[in-house]
Amino acid sequence: MARPPQPILAVNFKAYHPYSFGERALRLARAAEKVAKETGITVIVAPPFTEITRIAENVEIPVFAQHVDPVEPGARTGYIPLEAVKEAGASGTIINHSEHRLRASDIAWLVEKARSLGLQTLVCADTPVVAAAVAVMAPDMIAVEPPELIGTGIPVSKAKPEIVTDTVKLVEKHNPHVTVLTGAGISSGEDVAAAIRLGTSGVLVASAIVKSENPYSKMVEMAAQALKAWEKYR
């Protein structure tokens, strides 16, 4: 499978109040940027829609939207088209997170439209079979996340490692150019190392960093373990 030049740490801010909003969101993004510069890993941040512009204007790391709607701009009250997140400063978007699922046809439409707009896509999948189907759509990244483990602190790499390895094999079979990440329950550097050992290129993580008393230290811990595993298994 094609691999990025360094491991990836994608941080989903979700909508945790007060952690994910205002000055605290900006401080978190700046801490993520600092970790990226100090360690050389790729750190992606996905803040709420309301924080995209503020963060994109103040950091140089990739800023993703947490979701987009499969609609064209127009009379779409309350919807978020791809053009809106691009205008806000995002360089990509998460699609089909387990907390905001979409139909397969809508995922395919969004991936294609995002590509035409120059936006990267990180599509979430709950099973290896779904990940394989998504791989055919050619997103930039796929994050395998069994929804029952999200927010539990129990990483999929430990609880269900076969989901990770099966996803890597199936995605490689259907589209070797797609980068695979692991999500759900990631809470420590050890979890990140396990994800890379199982064949993925990094993790999608949320509360373990966003709600941490020291997000910077938590990201440094994860980055350090990611680099060690990357050197050993890549």
Image (cartoon, grey):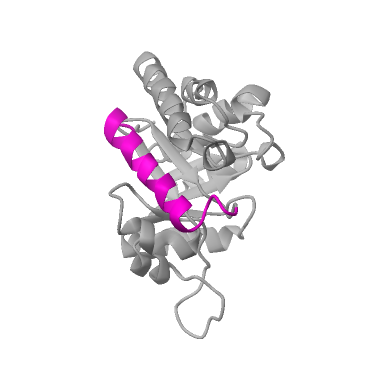
For the point 35% across and 33% down, which residue is it? 2
The quarter holding residue 201 reads top left
Residue placed most toward the observer, 122 or 20: 20
Residue placed most toward the observer, 208 or 164: 208
- 76 is higher (above) or lower (below) than 129: below
Q: Give the residue furthest to the right.
A: 148
Q: Give the residue furthest to the top.
A: 232
Residue placed most toward the observer, 116 or 64: 64
The quarter holding residue 212 reads top right
Q: Could you tell me how many numbered marks the image carries?
A: 0
Observer able to see residue 216: yes
Q: State the extent of the magenta-drawn residues as a range.
A: 17-41
Whole-percent x, y for residue 158 in the image: 63, 22
Whole-percent x, y for residue 7 in the image: 37, 30
- 123 is higher (above) or lower (below) than 8: below
Residue placed most toward the observer, 93 or 165: 93
Does the magenta-highlighted stretch encompass residue 30? yes
The quadrant of the image that shows the C terminus is top left
The quadrant of the image that shows the N terminus is top left
For the point 48% across and 63% down, which residue is it? 49
For the point 60% across and 59% down, which residue is it? 102
Does the magenta-highlighted stretch encompass residue 121? no
Whole-percent x, y for residue 220 in the image: 41, 28
The quarter holding residue 228 reads top left
Observer able to see residue 140: no
For the point 46% across and 76% down, which residue is it? 72
Q: Main secondary structure of the magenta part?
A: helix
